[in-house]
């Protein structure tokens, strides 16, 4: 299983330019640690960010291990290499801000506070999962934490995020919606439509492209027409935009906070492009992950652009943690991941009687609307739905 390497013994180094990365087209990188949003951080908060990133990585590695053992099925899109983005986003949220993302959603779910137990059980298809074992890898949801999933249709979440932000504005609530997508989703028509409406109606939505350069397996240069970066497309919609180094946690927080302030204060959207890199393929079904990119390239990113390595070294240099502290944080994350897998294995699968639950709100809650029309089709509808309260026959 791939590890982050010997993180505690590596000094911070000036990374070489990664291959295939787009030009940033912005001013030279500055010391983002001096930004007010970062200067106000306590040491405890900084350590917690490192812990959250380790938790995501160890969860993902445990999930891959059990997937390869045949303990779970379906898709599995790993977030390994991108952990800083989800953790930084949650770190700047205020009480009325929301998050919605695509199918690479495990990191966001854990960052907002979902437990490893409910997330791992969902991957195992167990009834103790966050979606009762019916959603799987791509459909983690926690409305109580203002996290709206986990969507399997490419770019399908972008108009939904726009809608959440529109609802906030319509109701006079000071808030915003971070709407995540990958570089492979930017060419979907619905994303352009969302950008247009967001700017036209001044909607407080923040679109975040997590650009890991290869979408489903085709390099950015072969799949998208660009001048310098994808975020520059926002100019066509009169929308503010910026690019971000996803390995620099201070920079990620700074740029996200600036976009959030714009949404809150001006009710204006922003398009951010965060350069990152996934260590594994698009999903477990990506058998060519080491064919369309070289092993040398993958190792280069792991060595110089790993967000956990970068943040851990930063905290070591600042004297916030010791090497022993880092090892303990990692150990705790591994143990939590192992415990969550044990919880998932011990949990029950959903019963057939639950097959039609959580499909229609009207049916589950026996609303007046549920008495009219036909909701289910076929001969296998559970008898309890075929009654006077649910006129579905």
Image (tube, grey):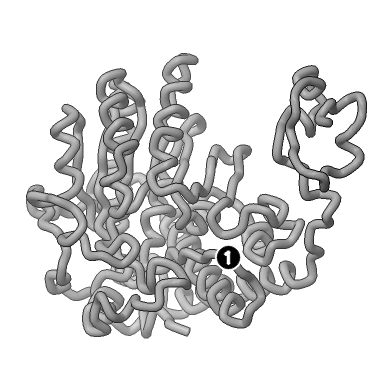
Question: Which of the pair 140/99 is nearer the observer?
Answer: 140
Height in image: 78 above or below 254? Answer: below
Camera-side residue of 37 and 386: 386
Q: Residue at x 19, y 33 (%)?
A: 240
Relative horizontal placement of residue 226, taking residue 52 as reference (left or right)? left
Q: Nearer the viewer, residue 332 or 66?
A: 66
Give the quarter of the figure containing the C terminus. Answer: top right
Q: From this viewpoint, is residue 197 visible?
A: yes
| Residue 290 percent coordinates (x, y) | 31, 80
Quadrant for residue 282, please give it.
bottom left
Q: Which residue appears at 67% of the width and 50% of the height?
A: 131
| Residue 49 placement: quadrant | bottom left
Q: Residue at x 45, y 54 (%)?
A: 45
Label 1: few (<14), some (14–19) or many (≥20) C-alpha neighbours in 10 Å: some
Instruction: Count how many numbered circles sit on residues in the image.
Output: 1
Circle 1 sits on which residue?
Answer: 74
In the image, taking residue 387 as reference, residue 355 lies left or right, namely left
In the rendered image, the vertical position of residue 365 relative to residue 35, given as above or below: above
Q: Please say if 277 is above or below 190.
A: below
Horizontal and vertical percent position of residue 159: 40, 33
Q: Looking at the picture, how far across and down is residue 344, in whole percent?
A: 72, 67
Give percent across and percent down for residue 40: 35, 45
Which residue corresponds to the image point at 25% horizontal and 62% vertical from the top-left? 213
* Callout 1: SS: loop
Residue most extreme to the front? 379
Q: Is residue 247 visible?
A: no
Question: Relative to residue 304, is residue 370 drawn left or right?
Answer: right
């Amino acid at each position: 299983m791939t590890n982050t390497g010997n993180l505690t013994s590596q000094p911070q180094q000036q990374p070489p330019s990664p291959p295939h990365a787009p030009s940033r087209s912005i001013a030279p990188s500055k010391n983002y640690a001096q930004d007010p949003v970062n200067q106000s951080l306590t040491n405890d908060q900084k350590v917690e960010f490192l812990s959250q990133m380790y938790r995501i990585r160890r969860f993902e590695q445990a999930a891959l291990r059990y997937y390869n053992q045949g303990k779970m099925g379906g898709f599995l899109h790993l977030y390994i290499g991108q952990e800083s983005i989800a953790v930084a986003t949650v770190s700047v949220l205020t009480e009325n801000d929301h998050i919605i993302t695509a199918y690479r959603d495990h990191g966001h779910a854990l960052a907002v506070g979902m437990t490893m137990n409910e997330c791992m059980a969902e991957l195992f298809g167990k009834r103790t999962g966050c979606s009762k074992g019916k959603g799987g890898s791509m459909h983690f949801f926690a409305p109580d934490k203002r996290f709206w999933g986990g969507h399997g249709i490419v770019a399908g979440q972008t108009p939904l995020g726009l809608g959440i932000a529109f609802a906030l504005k319509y109701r006079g609530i000071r808030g915003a919606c971070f709407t995540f997508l990958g570089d492979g989703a930017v060419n979907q028509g619905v994303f352009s439509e969302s950008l247009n409406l967001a700017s036209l109606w001044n909607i407080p939505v923040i679109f975040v492209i997590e650009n890991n350069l290869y979408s489903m397996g085709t390099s950015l240069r072969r799949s998208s027409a660009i001048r310098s970066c994808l975020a520059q497309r926002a100019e066509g919609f009169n929308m503010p935009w910026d690019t971000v180094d996803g390995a620099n946690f201070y920079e990620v927080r700074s740029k996200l906070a600036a976009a959030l302030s714009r949404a809150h204060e001006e009710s204006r959207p922003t398009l951010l492009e965060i350069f990152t890199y996934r260590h594994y393929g698009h999903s477990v079904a990506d058998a060519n992950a080491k064919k369309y990119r070289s092993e040398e390239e993958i190792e280069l990113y792991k060595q110089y652009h790993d967000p956990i390595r970068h943040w851990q070294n930063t905290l070591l240099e600042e004297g916030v943690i010791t090497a022993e502290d880092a090892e303990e944080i990692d150990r705790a994350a591994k143990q939590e991941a192992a415990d969550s897998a044990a919880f998932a294995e011990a949990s029950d699968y959903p019963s057939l009687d639950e097959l039609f639950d959580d499909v229609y709100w009207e049916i589950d809650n026996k609303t007046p609307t549920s008495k009219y029309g036909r909701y289910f089709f076929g001969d296998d509808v559970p008898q309890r739905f075929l009654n006077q309260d649910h006129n579905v026959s």
